[in-house]
Image (cartoon, grey):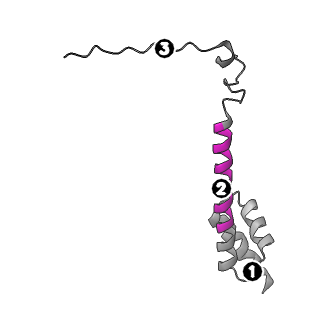
Amino acid sequence: MKQKGQHKKKKKRSCAAKSSGDGTASDGNKKDVEEERKDGEGTKELEKVEKKIIESLMEAFCSVSMEEAMAAYKEAGGDLNKAAEILSDLVRKRR
């Protein structure tokens, strides 16, 4: 016995389910909510990395405070090597 191919009819969506063209999805949320969530995760990940860098600088230069390490890192524009040079100069001046 041969089975006939079953064709399902596509359901028509109501007007309420259609995009309004103003950037909102059918449920009323912005289309970029997912992107914002991803950006938030990226920011958190970046903060974790920066925290580890600051801790590494503090460990390498035992006599510097967290504030000094953060300031050096910011002054160096996020460049770990430059921040290390800044802290090295700071420690050398203290002696």
Q: Quadrant of the N terminus?
A: top left
- The answer for how far apart the CA atoms under marks 3 and 1 are is 72 Å
Residue, disc 2 = 46
The mark lying in front, picked from 2 and 1, is 2
- The residue lying furthest to the bottom in this view is 95
- The answer for how far apart the CA atoms under marks 2 and 1 are is 27 Å
- Taking the spot 64% from the left edge, 38% from the top edge, the residue there is 35
- Taking the spot 68% from the left edge, 36% from the top edge, the residue there is 33
Residue, disc 1 = 91
Place of residue 55 in the rendered image (x, y in percent of width and height, measured from the top left) = 68, 72
Place of residue 89 in the rendered image (x, y in percent of width and height, measured from the top left) = 73, 75
Report if the CB atoms under discs 2 and 1 are less than 8 Å apart. Answer: no
- Dot 2 alpha-carbon crowd within 10 angstroms: few under 14, some 14 to 19, many 20 or more: few
Residue, disc 3 = 10
Q: Amino acid at mark 2?
A: Leu
> From the viewer's perspective, is residue 28 above or below residue 83?
above
- Taking the spot 76% from the left edge, 61% from the top edge, the residue there is 75
- The answer for how far apart the CA atoms under marks 2 and 3 are is 45 Å
Q: Earlier in the sequence, mark 3 or mark 1?
A: 3
Q: Amino acid at mark 3?
A: Lys
